[in-house]
Image (spheres, helix red, strand yellow):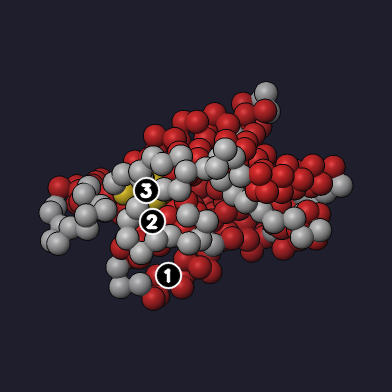
């Protein structure tokens, strides 16, 4: 059979199954590494030994399963179709962002997020076409962890979550709320929700394939590079891109 004629989903699923068996030993070794001590620990990362073990496990999962499937998806799917898939998921995220921006009392961001959802869901064919960006309506991504940060809740220690990757204690505590607020839950069929989750993971990973290669080639310590980048990005989001030089309480939303 011509390889090009094999459905993309079937090819991805086959690669996924074949590579899952390769995770057991690397995953066990990665978790055992958590017992090792780390010299000169970062004060923002007091659980670094455990985090590094989980990070290594996630890297093994990515190498054995997620990256190969994402690569197959990218190579077999036209760019215009991948763009539509990404737009669809961005539209779902904009709906949750609108709620969180409202909770943060950010009027401009709330209005922009609501306008994006309205435009892209109607004129944009359910979010597949990003009409809002053509009208220069800005995206303001937000989740419940960011909402807590805007109301003064500290980030707490850095955390690496199995399969999910970089986080903080604050964002981890907020995660159940974010999962509950995920618009995918609006689909009644559990199979549809699961399929959307898998597709989102694959599509997101395919988007960052090139960036991952650059990081691997440039970073002497990929763990530290990703940790510092994540913490800096979250802090910039809390302070609207203007964080103070020294650690300070997060700005309180204006009533």
Please provide percent x and percent y for residue 165. Answer: 40, 49
Q: Quadrant of residue 235?
A: bottom left
- Badge 2 is on which residue? 231
- Which quarter of the rendering shows the N terminus? bottom right
Q: Secondary structure at mark 2?
A: helix
Q: Secondary structure at mark 1?
A: helix
- Which quarter of the rendering shows the C terminus? top right
Q: Secondary structure at mark 3?
A: loop
Up the image or down, 43 lies above or below 98; here it is below
Please provide percent x and percent y for residue 23. Answer: 36, 48
**Is residue 255 in view from this perspective?**
yes
Q: In whole angstroms, how far apart are the C-alphas of marks 3 and 2?
A: 15 Å
Please provide percent x and percent y for residue 61. Answer: 40, 50
Q: In whole angstroms, how far apart are the C-alphas of marks 1 and 2?
A: 16 Å
Please provide percent x and percent y for residue 11. Answer: 61, 51
The outermost residue toward the bottom is: 218
Precedes in sequence: disc 1 or disc 2? 1
The crowding category of the residue bearing disc 2, from other C-alpha atoms within 10 Å (few below 14, some 14 to 19, many at least 20), is: some
- Badge 1 is on which residue? 215
């Amino acid at each position: 059979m011509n390889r090009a004629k094999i459905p993309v989903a079937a090819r991805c699923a086959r690669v996924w199954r074949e590579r899952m068996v390769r995770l057991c030993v690397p995953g066990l070794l990665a978790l055992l590494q958590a017992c090792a001590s780390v010299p000169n620990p970062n004060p923002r990362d007091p659980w670094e030994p455990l985090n590094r073990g989980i990070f290594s496990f996630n890297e093994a999962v990515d190498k054995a399963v997620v990256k190969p499937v994402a690569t197959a998806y990218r190579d077999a799917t036209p760019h215009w179709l991948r763009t539509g898939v990404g737009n669809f998921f961005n539209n779902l995220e904009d709906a949750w962002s609108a709620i969180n921006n409202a909770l943060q009392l950010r009027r401009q961001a709330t209005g922009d997020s609501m306008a994006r959802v309205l435009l892209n869901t109607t004129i944009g064919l359910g979010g597949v076409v990003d009409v809002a960006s053509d009208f220069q309506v800005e995206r303001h991504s937000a989740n419940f962890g960011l909402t807590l940060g805007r109301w003064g809740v500290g980030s707490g220690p850095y955390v690496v979550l199995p399969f999910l990757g970089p986080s903080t204690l604050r964002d981890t505590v907020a995660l159940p709320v974010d999962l509950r607020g995920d618009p995918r839950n609006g689909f009644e069929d559990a199979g549809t929700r699961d399929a959307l989750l898998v597709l989102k993971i694959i599509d997101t990973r395919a988007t960052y394939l090139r960036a991952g290669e650059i990081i691997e080639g440039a970073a002497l310590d990929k763990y530290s590079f990703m940790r510092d980048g994540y913490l800096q990005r979250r802090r910039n989001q809390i302070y609207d891109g203007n964080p103070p030089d020294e650690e300070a309480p997060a700005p309180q939303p204006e009533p």
